[in-house]
Amino acid sequence: MGKTSKDKRDIYYRLAKEEGWRARSAFKLIQINEEYNIFDGVLRAVDLCAAPGSWSQVLTKKLRQNAENVEDVKIVAVDLQAMAALPGVIQIQGDITKLSTANEIIKEFEGKNADLVVCDGAPDVTGLHDIDEYVQSQLLLAALNITTHVLKKGGVFVAKIFRGKDVTLLYSQLKQFFEFVTVSKPRSSRNSSIEAFVICQNYQPPEGYEPTMVNPLLDHKYCDFNQFTGPNRFIVPFNACGDLSAYDSDTSYPLLLEGQTSYEYKEPVQGPINPPYKEILDKTKFSNKCWRNINA
Ligand code: SAM
């Protein structure tokens, strides 16, 4: 394939090079803005999962247009990978699912809030859709957690989302924090990709909500539910059912249960039809037979 074939196949790849963007993704953010005006009045922004940096380039250009003084513009870009420097962009190399990274971002804002948080985070896709969707949703929730620490009330959050079968659960989580949640697919995003972007406008956390990096759905390290109060305590209720006098599934019982006088072994009602260990069992039976024949 010649040098120009990708330029023929992917118009946004070609245009990105011609216009000086580090990646074709720049057009996704530009097109989202054309529809939702997400940069209106924005001076401070966080770019999560930013490398190689085309969204940071777009942010720099748009936010500087908004500012009377370039010094008023603040852009913090975060990625696992190192990113070549961009003038006016503060870079943090870190994992957005880690508390330490969230703290570094918060520190950069020195007590002030961001007007906009964007996240184009994508895991290394495995091709196993369920896993890819799960990891992507983890990134989105990590980005939301960081957002709740730094975004001003009324602010905007834009994030990549995979439109998988559990996507409505994510929408309803986002709706807890934003008045408007819309999903958008820019023209520059390939139809063959399940990616889309959530545009979350007018950040309004539930009254009394305390930002926390603990995510009960994802973080299995935390153990003390009681550390949460008010709306933070909203967790899926856990309910034990079955009569207390019912057998305990973790206890061994004698073969003769209370009131019984005899015990008879019964085969399971339905064994596995074709279990993965069947092949090994068959091979073992065969080799045992051979072994007996040799020794006969
Ligand atoms: N918006 C970028 C641009 O315009 O140049 C492109 C982002 S690229 C599609 C996705 C990025 O997500 C990768 O650079 C990857 O390193 C980053 N990423 C994935 N998981 C991450 C994580 N847990 N923390 C930080 N960055 C992550």
Image (cartoon, rainbow, N blue to C red):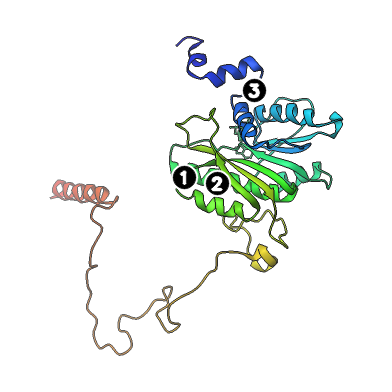
Mark 1 — residue? 164
Q: Where residue 270 appears, x then y in whole percent?
A: 23, 64
* Image position of 24 with respect to 128: above or below: above
Mark 3 — residue? 22
Q: Looking at the image, is mark 3 or mark 2 earlier in the sequence? A: 3
Say if mark 3 contacts mark 1, CB within 8 Å.
no
Q: Quadrant of residue 243?
A: bottom left
Q: Could you tell me which residue is drawn at 77 percent across and 46 percent down?
A: 106
Q: Could you tell me which residue is drawn at 70 percent across and 51 percent down?
A: 148
Say if mark 3 contacts mark 2, CB within 8 Å.
no
The crowding category of the residue bearing disc 2, from other C-alpha atoms within 10 Å (few below 14, some 14 to 19, many at least 20), is: many
Specify the label residue 37 is tagged with.
none
Is 230 displayed left or right of 243 in the figure?
right
Is 167 displayed left or right of 140 in the figure?
left
Q: Which of marks 1 and 2 is in front?
A: 1
Q: Looking at the image, is mark 3 or mark 1 earlier in the sequence? A: 3
Residue type highlighted by circle 2: Ser
Q: Could you tell me which residue is drawn at 66 percent across and 30 percent down?
A: 55
Q: Where residue 70 appears, x then y in whole percent?
A: 84, 29
Q: Where residue 82 appears, x then y in whole percent?
A: 68, 30
Q: Could you tell me which residue is drawn at 84 percent across and 45 percent down?
A: 110
Residue type highlighted by circle 1: Gly
* Element under disc 2: helix
* Element under disc 1: loop
Say if mark 1 contacts mark 2, CB within 8 Å.
yes
Mark 2 — residue? 137
Q: Is mark 3 within 8 Å of ligand 1?
A: yes
The crowding category of the residue bearing disc 3, from other C-alpha atoms within 10 Å (few below 14, some 14 to 19, many at least 20), is: some
Regarding residue 98, the answer to whether it shows in the image is no
* Element under disc 3: loop
Q: Quadrant of ligand 1?
A: top right
